[in-house]
Image: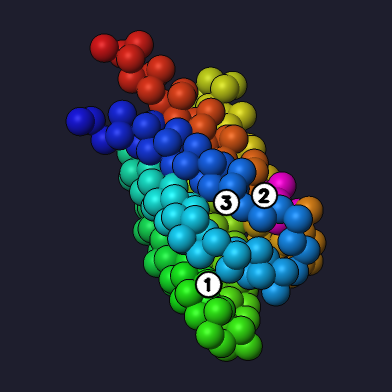
Amino acid sequence: MNSRILSGWLLIVGPLAILTAFLMWPTSAETAQEELLELAKNPSTSIAVMALFITGITLLFCGLSIASRAIDESKWSSLSVVSGILFPLVIPIMMGSVGLNFGAVRLFETSPESASAIYLTGYHLTDVADLLMGISFVFFAVALVDQFKDSLRRGIGFLYLIIGVVHIISVFAQEDAMDIAAWMGMFIVSIAFGVVVLRAKASNN
């Protein structure tokens, strides 16, 4: 399979898997402690949802890395080389976070205090991922805008730039609404970019 076709499918399937996991997540919880309490009510289902989430994250950031490496030589294409390296680094960080969450959910019944401490660590490990994602998206967006001249793909590049900046700001501002906007924007724009990549490849055949 051509790498661009692969990246297009990954950019679509990854976010859809994550969004499905989000729909099954306990949205009523306002704190990490409350979230853990809800997840611990049904450990098997919660672990399955987290497994779906990390699968989606892996697919999405593999797709973004491949898309970065597929950008042709241009003035700012060297930035896409950096984003192609940084995007995959998000995966082990998120896996570490989800792995801690797995352990916390399983441990909660026998040791609630230890489980809470572990879950809180995993919960805030994603702050590092937000910073890494922000930098990666900014670099990728600049290379994307420089690479393409059509308004659609340049528009996606500018949206990725905004998403990257919001990811970075959310690390320091610690505003839940801003963090949610950055993540949801990342999913929607990535799906749109995946569709554009597949359509462009189909039209060239």
The kind of residue tagged 1 is: Val
- How many neighbours does mark 1 have within 10 angstroms: few (below 14), some (14-19), or many (20 or more)? many
Q: Secondary structure at mark 3?
A: helix
Which mark sits nearer the N-terminus, 1 or 2? Answer: 1
Residue at disc 2, secondary structure: helix
Amino acid at pointer 3? Val
Identify which amino acid the numbered label 2 is placed on.
Ala
| Circles 1 and 3 in contact, beta carbons < 8 Å | no
The majority secondary structure of the magenta stretch comes to helix
Marks 1, 2: nearer the viewer: 1
Determine whether 154 is above or below 140 in the image.
Answer: above
Residue at image coords 59%, 47%: 24
For disc 3, the neighbor class at 10 Å (few under 14, some 14 to 19, many from 20) is many
Q: Secondary structure at mark 1?
A: helix
- Point out residue 12 in the picture as x, y percentages from the top left corner: 45, 33
Q: Is residue 65 above or below residue 105?
A: above
Identify the image quadrant of the C terminus. top left
Residue 13 in the image: state x and y as whole percent: 42, 36
State the separation of the CA atoms marked 1 and 3. 35 Å
Residue 50: x and y, percent?
48, 58
- Dot label at residue 138: 3
Q: Name the residue that disc number 1 marks.
A: 105
Instruction: Give the residue at x 41% y 26%.
Output: 197
Q: Quick one: quadrant of the N terminus?
A: top left
Q: Is residue 18 visible?
A: yes
